Amino acid sequence: MAKSNLITAAILLASLSSPVHAYTGSELKDACDRESTWCTDYIGVISDSMIRSADPRYCLPFTPTTAYQQLRDSVTKYLNEHPEELHRSAAAVTTDALHLAFPCKGSAK
């Protein structure tokens, strides 16, 4: 990962734990619609943090750091197809979108 991506990831992680502002699905959709790098970086950070958990909600068929565009496309599709979800947190809709797009085989989650 380039140094600027690491800095962006650190900022995003800090903002995720901040009680001051939790990003919504609507804000994420707006960033993705503008083709902002923030959208791709945010989705990458969520993906990386979840995939490293002891019980991931989705199983990616590739190395996330080499396929952020595919992750972004999956999340953007979900945001466009589920406008009723845009009020939820960006992290929650990102996780749901990735779970739908990349379910683990044999998983009932």
Image: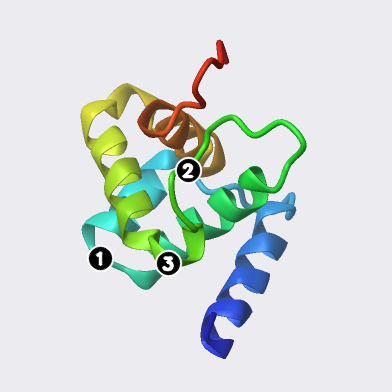
CB of mark 2 within 8 Å of CB of mark 3? no
Residue at x 55% of width, y 10% of height: 108
SS for dot 3: helix
The residue mark sitting in front, 2 or 1, is 2
Compared to residue 35, the image places residue 46 above or below, namely above
Amino acid type, label 1: Glu
Give left or right: position of 105 versus 57: left
CB of mark 2 within 8 Å of CB of mark 1? no
Residue at x 49% of width, y 43% of height: 90
Classify 10 Å Cα crowding around label 1: few (below 14), some (14-19), many (20 and above): few
Instruction: Locate the C terminus by quadrant.
Output: top right
Q: Where does label 1 land, which residue? A: 35
Q: Nearer the viewer, residue 106 or 22?
A: 106
The residue mark sitting in front, 1 or 3, is 3
Amino acid type, label 3: Thr
Q: For the residues marked 2 and 3, what is the alpha-carbon distance in whole angstroms?
A: 11 Å
Classify 10 Å Cα crowding around label 2: few (below 14), some (14-19), many (20 and above): some
**Location of residue 18 (image quadrant):** bottom right
How far from the left and from the top, in percent, is residue 71? 37, 50
SS for dot 1: loop
Q: Where does label 2 land, which residue? A: 60
